[in-house]
Image (cartoon, rainbow, N blue to C red):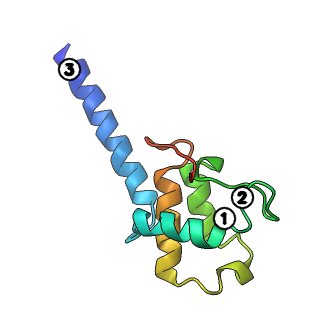
Amino acid sequence: MKSLIKSVIFLTLATFIATSVLAADGGNPRKGKHLFKKTCKTCHSSGGDGGEVTPMTKTQSQWDRLFDKKKHDEESWKNLSEQDLKDIQQFLFDHAADSPQPQTCG
C-alpha cells in the first residue's frame, strides 16, 4: 500500500514538473490576465472578429505551440513586448482546458 501511495505521489510530481517546463519561462500570469483582458478581449470576446477565446479554449500544449510558432496575426501583437507575450502565454497556459485550474477570463 505504501508503495502504491509513493508511486502516485511520484507520478503526480513528475507530471507537474513536466508541464511546468512547457510554460513560458519568466511569465507572470497575473500580469498576463490583465494584458489578455486589456488587449486580446477586444477581438476575442463573444461576437468579436476573432471569435471567443478564453484560457480553456485550448490545452496547455496548444497554447505553447501557438506562441512558440507565433501563429497569430502579427499586427495584433505589434504593441506587445516579448515579456508581455510571455505573461499572456503563462496566464493562458496556467488556466488551459487541461490545467489543474481551468478557467475562463471572467
The residue singled out by tag 1 in the image is: 41
The mark closer to the camera, 2 or 3, is 2
Mark 1–mark 2 Cα distance, whole angstroms, equals: 5 Å
Q: Residue 68, position in %: x, y? A: 58, 69
Observer-nearest of 39 and 8: 39
The disc label shown at residue 84, or none: none
- Asked if the residues shown at circle 2 and circle 3 are in contact, with their CB atoms under 8 angstroms apart, the answer is no
Mark 2–mark 3 Cα distance, whole angstroms, equals: 48 Å
The residue singled out by tag 3 in the image is: 3
Mark 3 or mark 1: which comes first in sequence? 3
Q: Quadrant of residue 13?
A: top left
Most distant residue in the top direction: 1
Mark 3–mark 1 Cα distance, whole angstroms, equals: 48 Å
Q: Quadrant of residue 63?
A: bottom right
Count numbered badges in the picture. Answer: 3
Q: Is residue 7 left or right of residue 46?
A: left
Residue under the image location 37 percent in, 71 percent down: 26
Using the image, determine if residue 93 lies above or below residue 14.
below
Q: Is residue 21 left or right of residue 5?
A: right
Q: Which element carries disc 1, helix, strand or loop?
A: loop
Residue type at numbered disc 2: Ser
Q: Quadrant of the N terminus?
A: top left
The residue singled out by tag 2 in the image is: 45
Q: Which element carries disc 2, helix, strand or loop?
A: loop
Residue under the image location 57 percent in, 83 percent down: 80
Q: Residue 87, position in %: x, y? A: 46, 70
Q: Residue 81, position in %: x, y? A: 52, 85
